[in-house]
Image: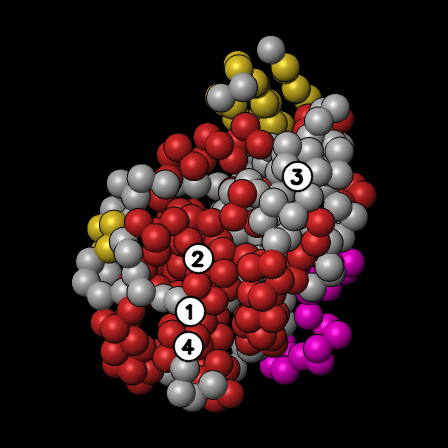
Amino acid sequence: MIHLKGFSLNKIEIEITYANINLMCVRVRLQGPDPSLVYRPEIVEKQYKDKEDYRNFENGGLFDRVFHTYKIMHSIQTLDFVKLKHSEWSHCSHSQMGVMDAVMSLDQLVDESDPDVDFPNSFHAFQTAEGIRREHPDNGWFQLVGLIHDIGKIMALWGEPQWAVVGDTFPVGCRFQNSIVFRENSFQDNPNTSDPVYSTECGIYTNNCGLEKVNMSWGHDEYLYRVMKYNECSIPEEGLYMIRFHSFYPWHSNGDYMHLCNEKDLRMLPWVQEFNKFDLYTKTADLPDVEALKPYYQSLIDKYCPGILKW
């Protein structure tokens, strides 16, 4: 049994108990207000940002909120934790609803890992989709992926803490690479960091094994990918890669973990990178007219993800 206790951060105590290799129990004791309710500054007044201003993880009005989210995430997201979350969520037994209802449910969610915006995620969904539509007007499935890519965050509305839902993703079961956000000062309490196998370059994997065989940190990317597969949605493989790996910034933006990639991953990488520029650079305070856009995007949903899905 491994017992890790005593990590404290701004009146938060986290106790992690590993009962065996298949189960991890996490207890988060809040000594004060939940940071997910506290760190909500006003929307930054500057409506349009320069590209170099995006993904600022060094300072800014949202820095405290962002760092606290990542600190907890990087302390708790281990291989055992990821396996536990797969067992809880991959059976799609939590709810049943249509895709547009899932998109609009994100009206209730502000992503606490995002240093760029502080407005509900539903607006970001339409911003991303419209950005893709302008440059790829004839590619309906691509536009749809822009709309739905974040709706796995619905887990946060069903009780999952945001540090297990939002933020950049990374492989578990092998060494945490340096390009991960806050790598130097947020993984000290993660037991996988000092594990003799999990801390090696390949860990439990082999060179060029392919990302499909890699366990990613648990979050909305992996969950939505599982939902799409479970419901047999007809989005092509390129779109599924965008959904599954759009938050994997250490890979698609920093070139890490290439030793785990196979030929398919390398073919799909340009698609993920093309998607990323719309996911990132459409985040502005210029909010779209959602009601006017709904009929068009419902037509895409009816084509690729029709009816009521299991979540």
Q: Where residue 250 sits: x, y (%)?
A: 69, 55
Query: Label 4 vs label 2: CA separation?
Result: 22 Å
Which mark is first along the chain, 1 or 3? 1
Q: Which residue is mark 1?
A: 145
Question: Quick check: can you spot residue 119?
Answer: yes
Q: Which residue is mark 4?
A: 143
Label 2: which secondary element: loop
Q: Tell me if label 4 and label 1 are in contact, CB under 8 Å.
A: yes
Label 4: which secondary element: helix
Give the foreground label among 3 and 4.
3
Mark 1 burial class by Cα count in 10 Å: few <14, some 14-19, many 20+: many
Q: Which mark is residue 206?
A: 3
Which mark is first along the chain, 2 or 1? 2
Q: Which residue is mark 2?
A: 109
Residue at the top extreme of this rendering: 1
Residue 305 appears left or right of 163: left
Give the foreground label among 4 and 2.
4
Mark 2 burial class by Cα count in 10 Å: few <14, some 14-19, many 20+: some
Query: Label 2 vs label 3: CA separation?
Result: 38 Å
Query: Label 4 vs label 1: CA separation?
Result: 5 Å
Residue 151 appears left or right of 261: left
Q: Where residue 146 sits: x, y (%)?
A: 45, 71
**Residue type beneath disc 1:** Val
**Residue type beneath disc 2:** Leu
Q: Which residues are magenta?
A: 45-65
Please say if 269 is above or below 156. below
Question: Quick check: can you spot residue 181?
Answer: no
Q: Where residue 260 sits: x, y (%)?
A: 66, 48
Which mark is first along the chain, 2 or 4? 2
